Image (tube, rainbow, N blue to C red):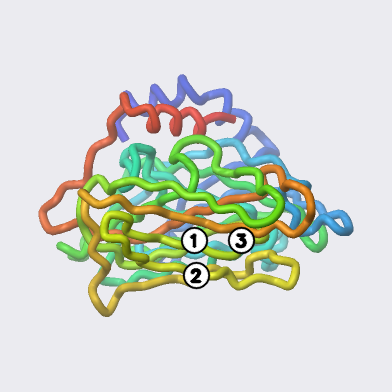
Amino acid sequence: MHLTRRIILAILFAPALAHAQAGGKITMTASMNRGDLVLDIGPFDVPAAMHGEHGDDHEMMMPEAPPLWVLVPASGWLHGYRVELTDQDGHSVPQAVLHHVNVIATQRRELFSGIMLRVAAAGPETGTVSIPSLIGYEAHAGDTLLVRSMLRPGDKSYAGVHILVRFPFTSSKAFLGDFTISPFYMDVTPPAGGHAFDIPVGRSEWFWEAKPAISGRIIGFSGHVHRYATLFKFEDRTANKIIWQARPDTTPDGEPKQIPIKRFLTTLGYGISADHVYRLTVVYDNPTGAPIVDGGMGALGGVFRPSGGVPWPAIDPSDKDYKLDVWAMWRP
């Protein structure tokens, strides 16, 4: 990262970073370990959920951690990611206590909007995101990675919890050539700012649609929803075609356990066009008899390969979504 950019970041965000990195506060490191690029965020002290509230993360929430950023330590390719949680003794912690962790590349924009590029996103139901070793997202030494994270009360209390985001990594000395890919993100709400919404009683449907900045092929994707989600759908509105839809695997009380991962590996991806409109939809069915404040979310994260020779679009600092996203993601 250029010295000027470092100085600007230090001036603009020093209060938030000081709060995050002071002694006893939450910090983040980036290191290379056994072929992985590892982001280590913590420590968090997680309380036990009160009886009857476990799973109701819209009612019982821990505060979101302050924004944390690191520089990528080496150049190479990232091949998906997985998230692990450990306590102060190194013991595994259930992923159910993870509300979300988002890893953001600040120097690049998204495919469907002008906000900063989401490199990884995970919630309690997110499994390992695997990408074949011949395909990868290219990262450069000195690139800035910004992380926002939040945990939620667990089945019991946990002390000194760390979130570990592991990216399988291939050095830039290897050659991947045309198999370089990019992650992409899409939400059922406008791209910048908060993405939680109130769920009314009964059935409700939420969607957002946009054109991709460039054409290419989607290699695969999965999603993130909250309790009482019943349907998740991604479609090409221009062609009037459903590309993918899934019903979340849930517990008896409606908590999502897993969102299926859709891959298009046998066809080398699913082609999308810059002149088509694509819509993401989530459906909720709230049986509680009362609205659930900030209870809903619906986000899609995937892997995209640009058409041959098409450069990735640059960030537009004047874009309203980009400016709002910078404010929202860097705020304490």
Q: Which residue is mark 1?
A: 223
In the image, residue 32 lies at what x, y percent? 42, 58
Mark 1 or mark 3, earlier in chain = 1
In the image, residue 248 lies at what x, y percent? 57, 69
Task: Kindly identify which numbered label has been placed on residue 229.
Answer: 3
Residue extending furthest toward the right: 51
Camera-side residue: 300 or 310?
Answer: 300
Residue 199 visible here: yes
Labelled pair 2, 1 in contact (Cβ < 8 Å): yes
Residue 40 visible here: no
Which quadrant holds residue 28? top right
Camera-side residue: 151 or 275?
Answer: 275
In the image, residue 1 lies at what x, y percent? 32, 35
Task: Kindly identify which numbered label has been placed on residue 60.
Answer: none
Q: Residue at x 42, y 50 (%)?
A: 186
Q: Is residue 134 left or right of residue 196?
A: left
| Residue type indicated by callout 1 | Gly
Label 3 crowd (10 A; few <14 / some 14-19 / many >=20): many
Q: Residue at x 44, y 40 (%)?
A: 191
In the image, residue 258 lies at what x, y percent? 58, 70
Q: Nearer the viewer, mark 1 or mark 3?
A: 3
Labelled pair 2, 3 in contact (Cβ < 8 Å): no
> Tag 1, which secondary structure?
strand
Which quadrant holds residue 253? bottom right
Q: Nearer the viewer, mark 2 or mark 1?
A: 2
| Residue type indicated by callout 2 | Ala
Q: Is residue 41 left or right of residue 119?
A: right
